[in-house]
Image (cartoon, grey):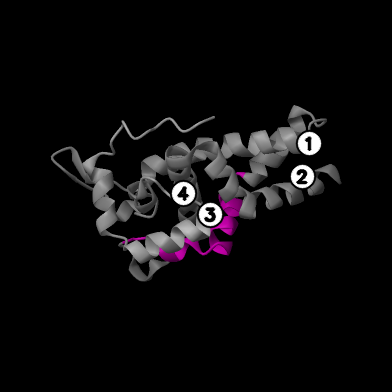
Amino acid sequence: MDSPTDDNNPLPQSTLVCLQFIDEDTLDDLETLLRSDFKRRALLAQAFIHKSCHYALKNKVVIQSNEKLEHLGDKVVGLAVCAFMHMKYPDRNEHFYTQVMQRALSNEVLSMVGTAMELDRFLVTKLPNQVLSAKTTADLVEAVAGALFLDGGSEAVDRFLSQRLYPLVELIAAEKAGR
């Protein structure tokens, strides 16, 4: 599935303002880490703005957090993992897919991916001491997937997930197959 956005669909000011929270060098580092050159870097910045920084004034969002990207990313990661499994395990049944996906899409596993990639060190937050829960790190992985999808489509998401998540999916599948 291709990205639903294009250059004719400008980003809202509440997303563009996220560029003020993350400097250009950090964005460069993130693009290298994610193996993706963003055409719309504000989406990348937004993926790393924690909900503690979200700001609305009189029902108008001034600073957009990564929550909407996380919502999209949840679905994008699920679709990508399902497609990966259909290609990798074409002879397996739906029960096998369900078991593997339930584990692979858990906060625990997604948090492992985010931690292994050290994504959480880039998160802009107002939380004290930047103590992040597994859910916060898992949500960050999903937000990044959402931003990648909006900017570069499913190919960008696959490049990202192939680094850490798809190998874990294979391990989980091997474990389930061995039972």
- Residue 110 image position (x, y, % from top left): 57, 51
Q: Please name the residue shown 33% across and 61% down the image.
A: 125
Instruction: Name the residue tied to disc 3.
Output: 35
Instruction: Say which mark, if any, is on residue 144.
Output: 4
At label 3, which amino acid type do we have? Arg
At label 2, which amino acid type do we have? Ala
* Dot 2 alpha-carbon crowd within 10 angstroms: few under 14, some 14 to 19, many 20 or more: many
Between the residue at mark 1 and the residue at mark 3, the CA separation in whole angstroms equals 26 Å
The quadrant in which residue 100 appears is: top right
* Dot 4 alpha-carbon crowd within 10 angstroms: few under 14, some 14 to 19, many 20 or more: many
Instruction: Name the residue tied to disc 1.
Output: 89
Nearer to the camera, 152 or 63: 152
Q: Which residues are magenta?
A: 105-125
The earlier-in-sequence mark between 3 and 2 is 3
The quadrant in which residue 151 appears is: top left
Instruction: Name the residue tied to disc 2.
Output: 173
Between the residue at mark 3 and the residue at mark 2, the CA separation in whole angstroms equals 26 Å
Nearer to the camera, 97 or 22: 22
At label 1, which amino acid type do we have? Tyr
Q: Quadrant of the N terminus?
A: top right
Q: Is residue 15 magenta?
A: no
* Residue 68 left/right relative to 140: left
Q: Is residue 56 visible?
A: yes
Q: Are marks 1 and 2 in contact (CB under 8 Å)?
A: yes
Q: Are marks 1 and 4 in contact (CB under 8 Å)?
A: no
Between the residue at mark 4 and the residue at mark 2, the CA separation in whole angstroms equals 24 Å
